[in-house]
Image (cartoon, grey):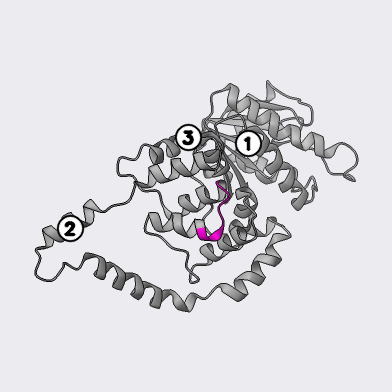
Amino acid sequence: MPFFLIKGDITTLSTDAIVNAANTELKMGGGVCGSIFKAAGREQMENACSALGPIKTGAAVITPAFNLKARYVIHTAGPVYRDGKSGEEAELRACYTNSLALAKQHRCRSVAFPLISSGIYGYPKEKAVKVATDAIRSFLKDSDMEVSLVLFDRTQIHTPLLNEVQKYLDAAYDPSQARSLLDEELQALHHVFEPVTGAPMQDGLQAMLQNLDEPFSDTLLRMIREQGKSEVEVYKRANLDRKHFSKIRSGKGYLPSKKTILALALALELDIQDTAWLLERAGYALSPASKFDVIVEYFIKEQIYDIFAINEVLFSYDQPLLGS
């Protein structure tokens, strides 16, 4: 955990492993495969692959990454799409599950995938994304690893939720409020820190400190217990890694970001009022001037708490993703 969508060039990533959408002969090809061979060093990668090929469709093998920033390259042979009824889905899923198992075997903590078979092999992109996300999410239920799916552009995500989110944005998103909201926040801060007339500043500050509510970490842990959920369940549903969650739960003055608190609210399946209250505990609020906020607000109001589905929409709108 966690799982993210990334727009960019997989050859530039410094993850423990990147995955190559290979052919069964493990020869240098075009597209992602050709780019990986070139960036790694063609001769070195060809020599390494020649000792391992050929492989079956869906199988995976591993080589050093040579000149790449990653440590390893995992090569997996995706299926050629025919009619969708010839076993292609099972073969494509095997590409992800076998690659992830190999990464785990080599103690990789992070791995990045391209969208396998979606280029010249003709697998429909929408279906390819679904197979990839389902396979990765299934693996992460019982494993701790950071996994990224690297896409060339944001149009590769096709979800029926986009139309409904756009309607909500048209009605609720108002970027013109950004200035007035900032002025209100500054006024509120001025009021909070303004000393009581006739009293020294130190006395006013001391009074404020004596009236602080429970720490955010205590609030969060109490809410987890009240919801009858486990801490592991919550941080995984929130797309957080264990180290980040441990930092939050330990207290010690650490306050998570607004994005992280929203991820935790979704993991706890809070309604919009309880989400606003939890944000307020850390000094945040949802804003109609923030496209990110309005999109997340839509999902909370609709009681759609699947962070991976929400991240697909956020990715399409070029917004930050929820999670670590």
Amino acid at the residue labelled 3: Arg
Name the residue that disc number 2 marks.
205
Part of the protein shown in magenta: 268-273
Quarter of the figure with residue 211: bottom left
Q: Quadrant of the N terminus?
A: top right
Magenta: predominant secondary structure element?
loop
Looking at this view, is 196 or 171 the one in front? 196
Q: Nearer the viewer, mark 1 or mark 2?
A: 2
Q: CA distance from mark 3 to mark 2?
A: 35 Å
Amino acid at the residue labelled 1: Val
Task: Give SS at disc 3.
Answer: helix
Amino acid at the residue labelled 2: Leu
Per the rendering, the mark at residue 66 is: none
Answer yes or no: is residue 117 visible: yes
Q: Residue at x 70, y 60 (%)?
A: 161
Residue 276 coordinates in the image, percent (x, y):
47, 60
Per the rendering, the mark at residue 242 is: 3
Looking at this view, is 101 or 2 the one in front? 2
Q: CA distance from mark 1 to mark 2?
A: 55 Å
Task: Give SS at disc 1.
Answer: strand
From this view, report whether residue 238 is shown above or below residue 300: above
